[in-house]
Each structure stands twice: as structure tokens, then as C-alpha cells.
Image (cartoon, rainbow, N blue to C red):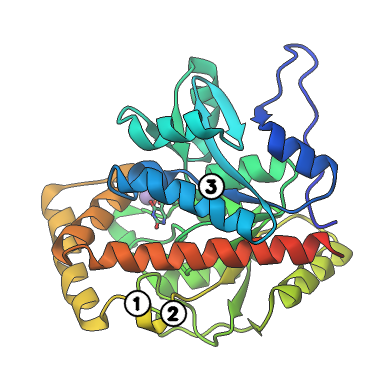
Amino acid sequence: MPQNPPAPLSQETGRSAFVLSEEVREALDEGRPVVALESTIIAHGLPRPRNLQVARELEDLVRKAGAVPATVAVLDGRAHVGLDGTRLERIAGDPGVRKLGHRDLAPALALGASGATTVSATAFLAARAGLGVFATGGLGGVHREWTQTQDESADLRLLAGTGITVVCAGVKSILDVPATLQRLETLGVGVLGFRTEHFPGFYLSSSGERVDWTVGTPEDVAEVMRARELLGGPPTALIVANPVPEAEQLDPATHDRVLAGALEACRRRGITGQAVTPFLLEYLMRETGGASLEANLAAVRGNVRLAARIAVAAAAR
Ligand code: PSU
Ligand code: MN
């Protein structure tokens, strides 16, 4: 089984660091496939009320492929792996929900806060809960102008030390893609192109950068996961880079033009830290008349479907 060993419950407080939904707990106990889903894209990456619809649709896609969805979020100081309908509604509808990276989990738990989890926090909690596969849209990475801002998403370092398979459409194209790929190489994070020799460009099918390894089926990915287990050693993430279909990508010329405006607006307004990614995504959405949103959704749907097929293949071994 490629899933991670579950974390022990805290004896002192009778509380574990996270709460599993009943559906997820049962699936894990029975060795059935489970797919973790992040919630930042729901709370901070998509407009309301479409975001709730999407959150439900993504869970349905996982179920249709024969796996159990586990959306991850923190509510009132409790980290949840698997959200019931009411909790999913809160994450999608409550404007007070924060954005929580891995380092924010402890204060959020201690202070009773609520927040959506980014890739770093989701991957961490999912791996701790014993899940082996995680789907998202695009990873965080090294931002352009990194030399001035030092803005590199905490996603990268967390993935470097977490044994989980992450299906994504590459890293967001608002980033410095070659620099991000270099960081992933340095950090020892595995990258597989799914039916592509190029690293996807999130809104675009290709970033123009190449990948070293290409796989053709979910079973191939499960084989790679198994080989990693056999090799042992310190845990690291495996990235499965799954491009948005060309027919559903954002027009590349529009993409390049609007992105330049978005980066300029971000700089002019002095936006920094956690606010950068949501600002850029929102700007693109507005200035492309919603076309970037459709490409974003197409990418996420494809990733969720593939992640479920990988989880099914991995559970069958
Ligand atoms: N991909 C999307 N929309 C998003 C994100 C990714 O399509 O909102 C989120 C992810 O949760 C990712 C986070 O972990 O953006 C990265 O934020 P930052 O650059 O602040 O680390
Ligand atoms: Mn950042």
C-alpha cells in the first residue's frame, strides 16, 4: 500500500492533530482509495458562489472514479481531512476563512481559527492522515522577481519532505517556471509528465519547459510510487504534471498579454506575501473575461480525475 502510516492520536488531550470524516476513516481502514483535495482554491482561488458548485463537483469526480474524496480544511481550530456538506459550505461561503500554509496550522489550531489549506498545509495533513494521493490546480513556486522579494511558495519546501503524490497542471504561470523546476530538482522532488514531454503551464497546456520523465497511464504512476517505497529513504513528494487539454487552454497570446498587466498591477499596488497569488489569479480572471477561470477549472477537473485513477491503481497493488 503506497499510503503513509497514520499519525498517532495524542494521548494527553484525547485529540488528534486532525479529524477524519467517517467516510475517509472507513476507506482508509479498508485500504480503499482516497484522494486529498485542497481548499484554498475553493476559498481564495475561485469566485463565489461558483466555488461551492466546483467543490462539490470535484468530490463527485473522485467518487465516480471509484475513490473517496477528502477535502482538507481547518474549522474552529480543528483540522479536517474529509469535509461533510455543511463544512464544505462554510469553506466556500464564509469570507472570514483565512488562507493557511503549513506554518499557519499550529496557530490556527491553538487559537481556534478557521482557514482553507494551501498545497503545503493540505499535503502535510493528508500525509499525516495516511493518504497517498492529492489533487490540486497548480502548485505554488518561485515568483518572478524572486531576487527582490524572496517570494518562494512554502509549497516547495514542504513537498521536499513529504511523501505524497501530487497531481497538478504544473505550477501557476504567474511564477518563474524555469526557476521553480530548478528548485524542485535541487529539493529532490520527483516530476513526471503525464502523456507529455513538457511541463504544463497551468492555464496553458505547455510551459515550454521539458520534463525528464513521461508516463502514459495511472498504473505507471502507481509503479513509480511503488519503486519509491522500495527504495526507501527520506520521504519526498512525487509530482504528476498533467496538462490541461489544448482545446480547453487559455489562448496563449491573451495569457501572455494579460499576465504582463497583472504582474505590473501587483508591483504598483505593493501587494506582497499571501495576497500575491489570489490577487494575480483574480486579475487574470477579470481581464480575460472569465476565460482564465474556465481553463483553471478544466485543469483542476482533469487533475482530480487522474488523481482518483492513480489512487485506484495504487490501492489495487
Ligand atoms: N492553484 C489554483 N488556485 C489557488 C492555488 C493554487 O489554481 O488558489 C493556491 C494553492 O493552495 C497553493 C497556493 O498552495 O495557491 C500558493 O500560494 P502562495 O504562492 O502564497 O504560497
Ligand atoms: Mn508567496
Residue 46's x, y, as percent? 32, 50
**Which kind of residue does numbered mark 1 sit on?**
Gln
Query: Callout 2, which amino acid?
Result: Pro
Which residue of the protein is positioned furthest toward the front in this rendering? 64
**Between marks 3 and 2 in the image, the one whose residue lies nearer the viewer:** 2
Report which residue position mark 3 lands on: 120
Q: CA distance from mark 2 to mark 1?
A: 6 Å
Residue 134 seen from this side: no
Residue 245's tag is 2
Circle 2/circle 1 CB separation < 8 Å: yes
Tag 1, which secondary structure? Answer: loop
Closer mark to the observer between disc 3 and disc 1: 1
Disc 2 residue: CB within 8 Å of ligand 1: no
Residue ID at (41%, 67%): 298
In percent of width and height, residue 76 lies at 49, 19
Q: Earlier in the sequence, mark 3 or mark 1?
A: 3
Q: Nearer the viewer, residue 287 or 51?
A: 51
Q: Which mark is residue 167?
A: none
Please provide percent x and percent y for residue 189: 63, 65
